[in-house]
Amino acid sequence: MPFPGARPVPVTIVGGGLAGCEAALRLSAWGHPVRLLEMRPLETTGAHKTSLLGELVCSNSLKSLNRETPHGLLKAELELSGSPVLEAALRCRIPGGGALVVDRDRFARALTERVERDPGIRVERMRVTCLPPDRPLILATGPLTHPDLVRDLSRFLPGSRLSFYDAIAPIVEADSLDCDLLFRGDRYGSPGEGDHWNAPMDPATYERFCEDLLWGIRVPPHEGVENDPEVLRAFQACQPIESLVESGPETLSFGPLRPVGLTDPRTGRIPCAVVQLRQENAEGTAFNLVGFQTRLKYSEQERIFRRIPGLGRARFLRYGSLHRNTFLDAPSLLNPDLTLAGLPGVYATGQILGVEGYTESIAMGFLTALVLDAAWRSDRPWSFDASETLPPPETAMGSLLSGLRTASSSPFCPVNLHFGLFPESGDSGRSRRIRRERLVRRAEQSFRIWKDRVPGLSGEERRVGG
Ligand SMILES: Cc1cc2nc3c(=O)[nH]c(=O)nc-3n(C[C@H](O)[C@H](O)[C@H](O)COP(=O)(O)OP(=O)(O)OC[C@H]3O[C@@H](n4cnc5c(N)ncnc54)[C@H](O)[C@@H]3O)c2cc1C
């Protein structure tokens, strides 16, 4: 029990996915009675196929276990903190190289059994159509939150604080760019000065690039999820770059690749087309390709986008995507104590909060449970200071949280963990390999120090990937 003191309170959790199960099992272990509300099998999301809790809807891989990678590091932190969902995944591991690949059926069954058998958790199968009045309340309804609940939530979240699909542009590492082929400049700013890098294209390069996009292999729509007319309408409002080209060869040069206001200081001319690269993090180690939301397969993104001048050796921190996804505008809604602005006692976690990916969702389930437990045991749950409770920004979990809180993209795009979210180690003169190693060692050390300070988290330490 991490935070001895005041009495634990009953917690209502809506959604029995990865984040909901992680939060439920943690809170129950720390003495909070939990009511877990899950709509399946009474209603389906279109992507889920079973009534099992923690069902993986697509790939059965939870990505790398290599601790030198952000995802491996995140799993190591989850394991060190005693994550029950990660433990179930490790038990159901099947061969998959360096990745944590699971037998999805065995994994979801094991998790369901564990949650349903937990004496502190009551699972109720019901569709939640409006924000329940219970407090504390955790929303963990995921990317395919039932539309009735989405409608009700919109009443509490004015403006565009709740999205129905995400349109993500790729992010590349700054030191993988060939700056000799790029120029600095903001639109209508002084040529050669500004925050953006620009990749100029001559007519032949532009034509070939459009041709590549037209023929590039795309990810097919998810059956039952993205064939829905409402979702297709939403997609039309935010077309992927390869679909724009279908409307005509000049669409891109009048759209996301428009060169107007961008004079190349080396030639004194405005190029035929320009790909703009916008700084993604405070350290300037990551840049996103402006307007490049795409449904091209990852391998195609590498092949085609590396043909952009200056991106020949680009390393991708994140690939572009466009898919159905219900998520909150975390930077504007997330209070320091992880409750939602304007909704005291209400937490959101997992993908609906704005992270993307299985492991990220599990990690957020843990962090939400941790803060909720500490807040509701304190004598000031409504104005709780979570700064001492949450892991520091140098850790993988802390970096993920910083990514949610301070995302620079506008509109906000869901966050998946990558090295660009980790604070720089101050070794800018060193090689990339050494800088990465230092980030990883610093993250490991910070996590251990933090974990030892948090009562109840210092269980048995097994090494992930060992
Ligand atoms: C089509 C698709 C494919 C994906 N593929 C991948 C992938 O390959 N790899 C990857 O890492 N990530 C993938 N993701 C993202 C992945 O779904 C999430 O990262 C992860 O499952 C989110 O966990 P979660 O707990 O937040 O939500 P979920 O696991 O989706 O759990 C949410 C739960 O809430 C329930 N629910 C929803 N609304 C209500 C309601 N109103 N009342 C009661 N219950 C409700 C749902 O039935 C569900 O069980 C994919 C997402 C989608 C939509």
Image (cartoon, grey):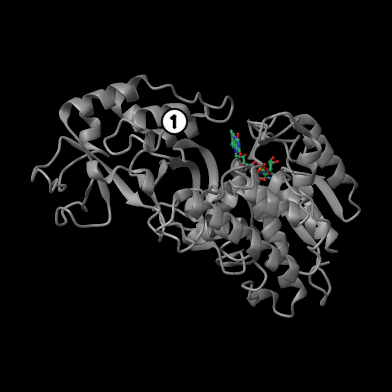
Q: Residue furthest top?
A: 215
Task: Name the one closer to the observer, 55 or 98.
Answer: 98
> Which residue is painted at 49% across and 47% down in the image?
163
133 relative position to 251: left or right:
right
**Looking at the image, in which quadrant does ligand 1 appear?**
top right
**Residue 33 visible in the snapshot:** no
Quadrant of the rendered image containing residue 369? bottom right
**Which amino acid lies under the numbered mark 1 shown in the image of this protein?**
Arg
Tell me: is circle 1 under 8 Å from ligand 1. Answer: no
The quadrant of the rendering that contains the N terminus is bottom right
202 relative position to 433: left or right:
left
The x, y position of residue 98, in whole percent, is: 66, 35
The x, y position of residue 46, in whole percent, is: 63, 30
Q: Residue furthest left?
A: 268
> Which residue is painted at 71% across and 42% down in the image?
465
**Residue 269 visible in the snapshot:** yes
Is 226 rendered above or below residue 344? above
The quadrant of the rendering that contains the C terminus is top right
The x, y position of residue 318, in whole percent, is: 47, 42
Q: Which residue is mark 1?
A: 295
SS assignment at label 1 = loop
Q: Tag 1: Cα neighbours inside 10 Å, few (<14), some, or many (≥20)?
A: many
Quadrant of the rendered image containing residue 335? bottom right
243 relative position to 353: left or right:
left
The x, y position of residue 196, in whole percent, is: 27, 52
Task: Name the one closer to the observer, 87 or 108.
Answer: 87
Task: Name the one closer to the observer, 268 or 170.
Answer: 268
